[in-house]
Image (spheres, rainbow, N blue to C red):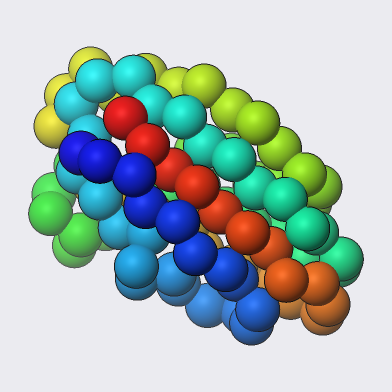
Amino acid sequence: MGVKTGNIGASGIVTASETRMNTGFNLSLSGFGTATVALQRSFDDGATWATIEAFTADTEKLGESHESALYRLNATAYTSGTIAYRISG
């Protein structure tokens, strides 16, 4: 996996953030107004997703993935702000 970056400006799944990881990873979220962004994981190639953690403020997070899994960001609630994301591993 390389580096994926972008902006969140509305509710919904951030498809550009979807990536497969099986090592450690870094997540950066900044520029929150009023929003909730969930980090989600799937072990079955995207058929089902589980929320790992939800964020409502700027965040710097280190994580580990011991199996090959898909990860994505999902803006589960959004009112304002342009949230910049960076996910790498």
Residue at point 37%, 59% (across, down):
17
Residue 39 locus on image (x, y percent): 50, 47
- The relative height of residue 67 versus residue 31 in the rendered view (above or below) is above
Q: Is residue 8 visible?
A: yes
Q: Is residue 15 above or below residue 32?
A: below
The picture quadrant where one finds residue 48 is bottom left
Q: Residue at x 35, y 70 (%)?
A: 15
Q: In percent of the image, x 59 and y 40: which residue is there? A: 28
Residue 12 image position (x, y, % from top left): 52, 77
**On the rendered structure, is 16 left or right of 81?**
left
Q: Position of residue 22 (x, y in %)?
A: 19, 26
- State which quadrant residue 83 falls in: bottom right
Residue that appears at 25% across and 50% down? 19
Which one is nearer the viewer's eye here, 70 or 61? 61
Q: Is residue 42 visible in the rendered structure shown here?
A: no
Please state which of residues 56 and 8 is positioned toward the viewer in this rendering.
8
Q: Is residue 26 left or right of residue 83?
A: left
Is 23 situated left or right of 24 in this image? left
- The N terminus - image quarter: top left
Looking at the picture, does residue 21 appear above or below residue 79? above
Judged left or right of residue 61, residue 14 is left
User: x and y percent of residue 10 in the render?
Assistant: 64, 82
